[in-house]
Image (cartoon, rainbow, N blue to C red):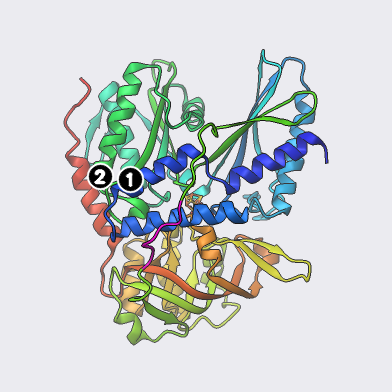
Amino acid sequence: MSAIRDSLVRLITETSTNLPPDVRRAIKRAQLQEEVGTRAALALNTIIDNIISAEEDVQPICQDTGMPTFIVHTPVGYNQIELEKEIRAATAEATRLGKLRPNSVDPLTGKNSGDNLGPGTPVVHFHQWERDDVEIKLILKGGGCENKNIQYALPTDLPGLGRAGRDLDGIRKCILHAVYQAQGQGCSAGFIGVGIGGDRTSGYELAKEQLFRPLEDTNPNPVLAELEEYILKTANQLDIGTMGFGGKVTLLGCKIGVMNRIPASFYVSVAYNCWAFRRLGIVVDAKTGEIKEWLYRDKPEAMERPQGGFDVKNAIVLRAPISEEQIRSLKVGDVVLIEGEIHTGRDEIHKYLMKHDAPVDLRGGIIYHCGPVMLKDEQGNWQVKAAGPTTSSREEPYQADIIEKFGIRAVIGKGGMGAKTLAGLQKSGAVYLNAIGGAAQYYARCIKKVNGVDLLEQFGIPEAMWHLEVEAFPAIVTMDAHGNSLHKDVADHSLVKLEDLKEPVFV
Ligand SMILES: O=C(O)C[C@H](O)C(=O)O
Ligand code: SF4
């Protein structure tokens, strides 16, 4: 392998498996702020446990390794065409090694290319500069948080906040609304990059560029520095908390950039990034292709495995087939430990099950909203490399019908589901179980065996139905069979808190 390709594979591997020190520090600060024993503290402890396991085992922090996006600076005269070929080859190699999940899907045919290569993937942006070295920055931003990006065209009216005009206070309202609308679904506590101005495309680009700023820098523009500080402090008054469980910390970082706009347009673009904020960079010798320096790693940050995860002693054991009686005895807040077989099913499977029979009997069973990273070992057996939950709300149109049609008793996911599912849980006798989003190593360790897989050819690795044998797999009941939903409660409460922030601050 060429030296430059080897350097790129290392960059991808490190970005996927080893969270940068500034991000670790932000998560540790959040952990200190949440009260011991709360659901938010439990979620943060699980996240930290997961970060440590991912680094130890050199496995993906989260199973969704996102849209690999490379920002490259090269000296004048450097061959960018060759470097792009190396980036593509390294991306395929990192996928083969299980450091990236195969994530490149043709939207028209549904075909997963299997190696993260395809039209538009990976994303590579080239710039020239007048230095002698090559700098390559990489961000692996997952789909769940990408779905929570939002763009505002001012003036506009915002729920809870009223009119947002074309001024600094209007911008303030948009950013607060952006955090509110994400709730826990982008795996809060999160980070935001904001772009003020530009057009719809350059505004989002500016927002994403902000995510490459070191978290502990100070904005050179004093107006924006003040706004960043205000947002970081104020967004945490929304009480959304880690995973949307309620809590003191909802936002871990806020970086804002500005560029000129044209008279008719006034955009505020917000790029939301989950806690699994995976971005790193390398400086490479232009001649040899070897790494000279790592970016974002000036002050290393070790983490200790926390005490105080799930209360497994008092947990209720669930094993399929689960009876309706047991399900109806569960209530919001209960911690469960799942034993035995569960079946993954995410977007493609839910759509499929609406029209087809299930490949296995799901009566009394448990569905896991999960698209894992899987690799075959030398004996040809599947191994789970990363397997955290995916955002459940995408299955909202189907979930209640699927539960009823197949007699499913529990659904595991993250971020919660809506009114239709809540009514369906009550009608059919089922529960929604929230797992900790992004904790892909933590949950992979609970999976003891792969019993089989269906629809792999058709849907590809993340979307297939995997039959997994689990042991002591913990989750929290956040929607029960009595019409209670923690997600609804937190959303309602945070809207009241948002309304408190309506009065102008920057006039
Ligand atoms: O695709 C996934 O596995 C997860 C996704 O990033 C999500 O947050 O929903
Ligand atoms: S599952 Fe959560 S942590 Fe993972 S990419 Fe999606 S939003 Fe980020």
Residue 355 falls in image quadrant: bottom right
Amino acid type indicated by mark 2: Leu
Using the image, tell me which numbered label, if any, was put on residue 62.
none
- Residue 469: x and y in percent read 56, 76
Which element type, helix, strand or loop, lies under badge 1? loop
Q: CA distance from mark 2 to mark 1?
A: 7 Å
Would residue 455 be counted in the magenta stretch?
no
From the image, tell me which residue sits under label 2. Answer: 238
CA neighbours of label 1 inside 10 A, class few (<14), some (14 to 19), many (20+)? many
Which element type, helix, strand or loop, lies under badge 2? helix
CA neighbours of label 2 inside 10 A, class few (<14), some (14 to 19), many (20+)? many
Quadrant for the C terminus, please.
top left
- Residue 488: x and y in percent read 27, 58
Using the image, tell me which numbered label, if any, was put on residue 250.
1
Residue at (28%, 22%) from the top-left corner?
168
Instruction: Look at the picture and state if 167 lies above or below 489.
Output: above
Q: CB under 8 Å between callouts 2 and 1?
A: yes
Residue at (77%, 42%) from the top-left corner?
89
Residue at (27%, 27%) from the top-left corner?
170
Residue 503 falls in image quadrant: top left
Range of residues picked out in magenta: 304-310
Amino acid type indicated by mark 1: Thr
Instruction: Look at the picture and state if 58 lies above or below 212.
Output: below
- Residue 346: x and y in percent read 53, 63
